[in-house]
Amino acid sequence: MEPIIIDGSLLEGGGQTLRISSALSAILGVPIRIHSIRAGRSTPGLRPQHLTGLNLIKDLTNGSMEGGSIGSTEITLRPGPIGGGEFSVDTKTAGSITLIIQAVLPCLLFAGKRSVIKMKGGTNVDMAPPIDYLTDIFSSFAKKFGAHFSCKLIRRGFYPKGGGEVDLTVEPVKQLTCVTLDQPQTIKCVHGISFVAGTIPIRVANEMASSATSKIQNSLGKIPVRIDQYKDDKAFGNGTAIILSCETTDGMLLGGTGLGKPRSPANQVGQEAADELIESCSRKVCLDQYAQDQVIIFMALAGGTSRVLVGPLSLHTRTAIHVTSQLTGVKFEVIDLKTQPETFVIECKGIGIDNTRL
């Protein structure tokens, strides 16, 4: 079979195209050729975390890959059946573990048995959702599709050395179910964590939590806010982060995150996390900016019609829709809700793919 050609330079022009196209290649059992990989980045081509994810999918399916090297701008992936089982991967950098999970999680749902992946890399790094977002927020949306996974955090790892460790466990499914998450939400409460690691003093975590709490209550009213502050003694290296979660009266979870960087004031990091959360809460949406693009592949694979209420579509989401439509043939409709500024419903009738390996 001739591979389907994917243009890696379109829209987001980064790793999103790689993650979704390689996952769908494995699930659908079709070869792909991706060219112009990460053409929109300052250093085009495969980076260690991208290559780690691609090699894992190749190994999961006992497939083959051409062009799999650091800096490569074109790869051809020919997958076999998704086997599942136990695997280990190590980016040997601070490459994001979360982004690797984004690529392999959909594949493992259609494996023939439970899978356990021991992963090493970065858990809380720039340009990627933190591992906490995946475990505390996105997992709740995955369950609504019938997908069950767990991430055991062994230790955190930060830029530049990484060194974080996570054990991912995924249960396979027969078929994903469609979801209807299209009703405006009402805020119930906010909770979160604010932590430091290494030589960074605990007062930094306290300042991040305090500034986030003030910003949230000034913007959203006197809702209950609880942010636990602590020093993570198991982490590898120095790092700080704050992860917030807003629970709605319907049980939806919306997230906001902030990552400490050198010379970034702690109160500014806390406010950045609060701003992300406030943006989603003020629009009364069901999915925040991070969950938006991640559910697109689930919607396309599920049986039946899914509808999700979101804010402005991110470039990652538009890229996910483009690549997913190209490989599955499904059509996504984006409905502009005139009653609420910059609020949309994404609708899709999925292909209802069955896991023939179960």
Image: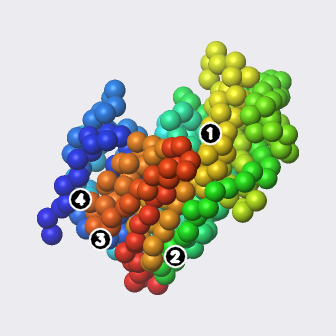
Furthest residue in direction front, as rendered: 339
Name the residue tied to disc 4. Answer: 32
Residue 36 percent coordinates (x, y): 23, 41
Q: Is residue 133 visible?
A: no
Q: From what the image shows, is residue 185 above or below residue 123?
A: below
Q: Helix or strand or loop: what does disc 2 sit on?
A: loop
Q: Please tell me whether mark 2 or mark 4 is closer to you in this view.
A: 2
Residue 128 percent coordinates (x, y): 52, 40
Residue, x 44% and y 77% (percent of image)? 303
Residue 109 percent coordinates (x, y): 49, 70
- Name the residue type under label 2: Thr
Of 286 and 59, which appears nearest the observer? Answer: 286
Q: Please tell me whether mark 3 or mark 1 is closer to you in this view.
A: 1
Q: Please tell me whether mark 1 or mark 2 is closer to you in this view.
A: 1
Q: Helix or strand or loop: what does disc 1 sit on?
A: helix
**The disc label shown at residue 29, or none:** 3
Name the residue tied to disc 2. Answer: 177
Real-space Cα separation, disc 2 to disc 4, in angstroms: 26 Å
Q: Does the residue at mark 3 contact the one at mark 2 (Cβ under 8 Å)?
A: no
Real-space Cα separation, disc 3 to disc 2, in angstroms: 21 Å
Few, some or many C-alpha atoms within 10 Å of disc 3 (few <14, some 14-19, many ≥20)? Answer: some
- Name the residue type under label 4: Ile
Of 285 and 9, which appears nearest the observer? Answer: 285
Q: Is residue 293 left or right of residue 44?
A: right
- Name the residue type under label 3: Gly
Q: Does the residue at mark 3 contact the one at mark 1 (Cβ under 8 Å)?
A: no
Q: Helix or strand or loop: what does disc 4 sit on?
A: strand
Name the residue tied to disc 1. Answer: 279
Q: Please tell me whether mark 3 or mark 2 is closer to you in this view.
A: 2
- For marks 2 and 4 on the same chain, the one whose residue lies earlier in the sequence: 4
Q: Quadrant of the N terminus?
A: bottom left
Q: Helix or strand or loop: what does disc 3 sit on?
A: loop
